[in-house]
Amino acid sequence: MAKALLGHVGGPDPRMVSEMRRLQQRVRDLEAELARLQDENDVLVASVGHDLLVPVREPALT
């Protein structure tokens, strides 16, 4: 009875194993894309002058 309660009939469900592998691959792909975009962003930030990154405030009119 314990086997039936735990779903222990023939081992793990192949569909679940396949879905887990697909999701793990998707996470790896997204992590690689994130790293690539961060590297690209670092290059772009380095190529932009600091005066463009920090806006100069106009004096307030009195």
Image: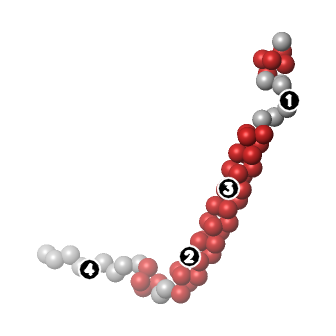
- Residue highlighted by disc 3: 27
Residue 41, label in figure:
2
* Circle 2 Cα neighbour tier, 10 Å, few/some/many (<14 / 14–19 / ≥20): few
Give the mark nearest the N terminus, 4 or 3: 3
**Relative depth, front residue between 7 and 43:** 7
Residue 30 at what x, y percent from top left?
A: 64, 61
Kindly identify the amino acid type of the residue bearing the numbered disc 1.
Answer: Gly
Kindly identify the amino acid type of the residue bearing the numbered disc 4.
Answer: Glu
37 lies above or below 26: below
Alpha-carbon distance for marks 2 and 4? Answer: 28 Å
Residue 10, label in figure:
1
Alpha-carbon distance for marks 3 and 1? Answer: 29 Å
Horizontal relation, residue 49 to residue 27: left or right = left
Q: Nearer the viewer, mark 1 or mark 4?
A: 1
Horizontal relation, residue 8 to residue 20: left or right = right
Residue 7 at what x, y percent from top left?
A: 79, 24
